[in-house]
Image: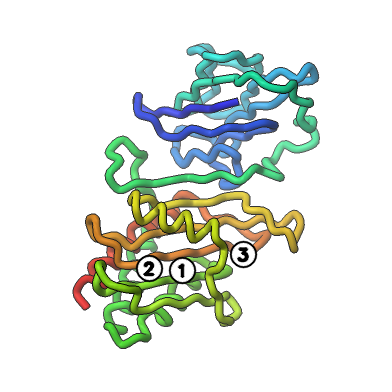
Amino acid sequence: MRLKATQNGQAVSESQFIKGPIYIGRHPQSQVFLSHHSVSRQHAVIFLDDNGRWAVRDLKSANHTYVNSKVITEVPLKTGDKIQVGVFIFQIDLERGQPLSPSIQLDDTHAPMNAEPQVIVRQLNNRSAPAIRVPAHRAGDLRALLCTAARGGNSGETVSQVLDVLLKQFDAHRVWCSFRYDPEGITEEEGGRTEMGELFILQQERIKTLLDQACRKGQYILLTHLKQPTKPGKEQSAILAPILGGDKVYGEIYLDSKPGKTCFSMSDLDYAMLLAVSLSVVLENF
């Protein structure tokens, strides 16, 4: 099943699922995470019923769930149906393929657990994207980070000092940064650190590929529900933020959350975007 999301007539995202349940809401661990005040934390769920058919159920949301402009409690879905959740509209496309087995019973899990990995992308030049939302205290955090970077100068110690600040501000598990003082030149500083102060080297090819993509396309990426093979049941999230000044790349930032702890939210992604853009101004003037 494909879910194509729009807001005010503008495309927001497109996701594909082969099994349920698919929780929709403001809860950070929702399979479809929507950071908007019109959406309840657990707003609705799409699932496979006992007959293997896709259906949607409202989870007693404040603003209700609509299918084809009608308030629903629970209804089956078909291609072309439109689900409204807050200010978002989802168009349903049920793709042809092998019959699917019923998902786990909803009564067994009202909270969205064992979620599928999700990629959430923010772009600076997307004028139709939802507004940036960060807590007021992030203003002080941003100033602290920029002061730290400015004091470091091009001494070769700037990355190390910035890593310490990012680990604290995001309560992160691991952080990695690279800086270029000349966007046309090579990387002058690079480094990574864990929450325990140990060296962290970014080696995951998928992450490196996504960082390259983020730099090329001006994307800020939040990865949710990342499974940990060595720690079953303990999921992580990650943020990938290019340090962009216009069309120039001054570096990259990677952070991941502590396994099994609170995952990064859209607010964290928004703050990462603001700090990365602001950091580019500091690096540009070194």
* Residue 282 visible in rendering: no
Amino acid carrying label 1: it is Gln
59 to 241, vertically: above or below = above
Q: Amino acid at mark 3?
A: Lys
Query: Is 56 situated left or right of 193 in this image?
Result: right
User: Gap in Å between the C-alphas at discs 2 and 3?
Assistant: 20 Å
Query: Which quarter shows the N terminus?
Result: top right
The residue depicted at 56 percent of the width and 68 percent of the height is: 203
- Can residue 241 be seen by looking at this rendering? yes
The residue lying at 54 percent from left, 35 percent from top is 40
Identify residue for label 3.
258
User: Answer yes or no: do the residues labelled 1 and 2 have beta carbons within 8 Å?
Assistant: yes
Residue assigned mark 1:
169
Task: Please count the marks in the image.
Answer: 3
- Quick one: label 1, few (<14), some, or many (20+) residues within 10 Å? some
The vertical placement of 79 against 238, above or below, is above
Q: Amino acid at mark 2?
A: Asp
Would you name the residue on which mark 2 appears? 141
- Whichever of callouts 3 and 1 sits on the residue coming sooner in the sequence is 1
Label 1 sits on a secondary structure element that is helix
Name the residue rendered at 69%, 31% in the picture.
Answer: 19
Q: Is residue 229 above or below residue 92?
A: below
The colour style of the image is: rainbow
SS at circle 2: helix
- Residue 78: x and y in percent read 60, 13
> Quadrant where the C terminus lies?
bottom left
Q: CA distance from mark 3 to mark 1?
A: 13 Å
Residue at (78, 26) in percent of width and height: 101
